[in-house]
Amino acid sequence: MDSLTVIVPVYNEATVLDNFYERVVSVLDGLREKDSIEGRMLFVDDGSTDESVAMIKKLAGNDPRVSLIRLSRNFGKEAALSAGLDHAESDAVVIIDADLQDPPELIPEMVSLWRQGYDTVYGQRTERRGETFLKRYTASLFYRFVGNLGRVSIPRDTGDFRLLSRRSVLALRNLTESNRFMKGLFAWIGYRQAALKYTRDPRYAGETKFNYWKLWNFALDGITSFTTAPLKLASYIGVMLSLGSFAYGVYVILKTLIYGDPVPGYPSLMTVVLFIGGIQLLFLGVLGEYLGRMFDETKRRPLYLIEEHLNAEQKRGVIQGKKAVAGHEV
Ligand code: UDP
Ligand code: MG
């Protein structure tokens, strides 16, 4: 019998967890009967401060298919997903948000595509309900930008909701960078990928954890980890400016030779000085974005720390993220 783990990152989702559990459980029951797949749920608690942990523990107490990894603090969704992927030992995993924006009822279709030989089956949103125009617009702008510049193309309108085969999961574990832009990593591993179209529902309850500032930083992570195009842009603009200023210099010299030098031109001088200054600061900033991320990478810190690991056998342990060592389990 094949096994499937549903990985759920959770950050303050107490208002939706019971409903989420009900819906996933009925899907898992269906899979067991129709596809003879043994489904499990792995909740990764990302430092919730509400009742989420207590609720998951209660679910785990009543249902051996539920397990919980509790991170030592809020590390962010990408780290929570990495923790889940590092600990899921099944033939396939499904990543799904706890807020029911991704319908669990799609999982059987994902499974059937997986059985047809696809390694990744990702949900592609045809419609996003309950999200503001600005969010949809900035999201599509971002996908277009990264899609055009990066060497790996990231499918558009695709979130983290997806099924991954065992070998995709193993491949992802090998990617050790601390800057985890998951959508990019999913695309980077390649293998056979299939899209499954669906309508993204509004959040069932609770609030989104991503404000525009977080999304902007997320976009910067995405761009800097998948393309060096902004760095190249600096060189191209530099070349253009040098050529332009050379031509302008020739013009100024000729003008002085022919018409003399009455020293006008304070405004144009000021404009040029400010423009060059601005461009230089801008590209210092771009350099800084890359340098800062390199700094983070060189520290080689674990992606997450586990506070508590509660699985079907009620085994508790303190495991270090990323390079989890079996000997560390208590
Ligand atoms: N999440 C998380 N850690 C965080 C923020 C979010 O694990 O720091 C989880 C959250 O509980 C949810 C999923 O990531 O299951 C998606 O978050 P959310 O619905 O807030 O994002 P949105 O759908 O608005 O992009
Ligand atoms: Mg959501």
Image (tube, grey):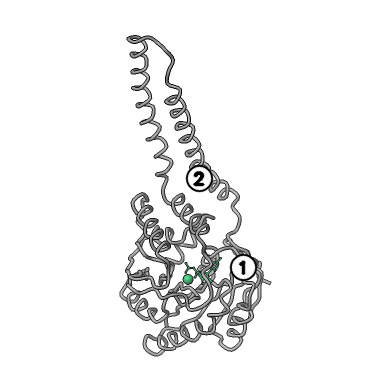
- State the residue at coordinates (37%, 81%): 108
Based on the displayed image, in which of its 4 quarters is residue 160 positioned? bottom left
- Mark number displayed over residue 326: 1
Q: Which residue is mark 2?
A: 290
**Is ligand 1 within 8 Å of the beta carbon of the residue shown at mark 2?**
no
- Mark number displayed over residue 314: none
Cα distance between the residues tagged 2 and 1: 35 Å
Looking at the rendered structure, the kind of residue marked 2 is Tyr
Secondary structure at badge 2 equals: helix
Image quadrant occupied by the N terminus = bottom left
Say left or right for 21 vs 260: right
Image quadrant occupied by the C terminus = bottom right
Q: Earlier in the sequence, mark 2 or mark 1?
A: 2
Looking at the rendered structure, the kind of residue marked 1 is Ala
Secondary structure at badge 1 equals: helix
Say left or right for 145 vs 321: left
Are the residues at dot 2 and dot 1 in contact (C-beta closer than 8 Å)?
Answer: no
**Is ligand 1 within 8 Å of the beta carbon of the residue shown at mark 1?**
no
- In this rendering, the label closer to the viewer, 2 or 1: 2
Q: Position of residue 180 (x, y in %)?
A: 50, 58
Say left or right for 9 vs 308: left
Q: Position of residue 204 (x, y in %)?
A: 48, 78
- State the residue at coordinates (46%, 65%): 170
- Residue 223 vs 282, above or below: the answer is below
Q: Nearer the viewer, residue 256 or 295?
A: 256
- State the residue at coordinates (37%, 9%): 260
Q: Residues within 10 Å of mark 2 (few under 14, many from 20)?
A: some
Based on the displayed image, in which of its 4 quarters is residue 248 positioned? top left
Q: Residues within 10 Å of mark 1 (few under 14, many from 20)?
A: few
Based on the displayed image, in which of its 4 quarters is residue 50 positioned? bottom right
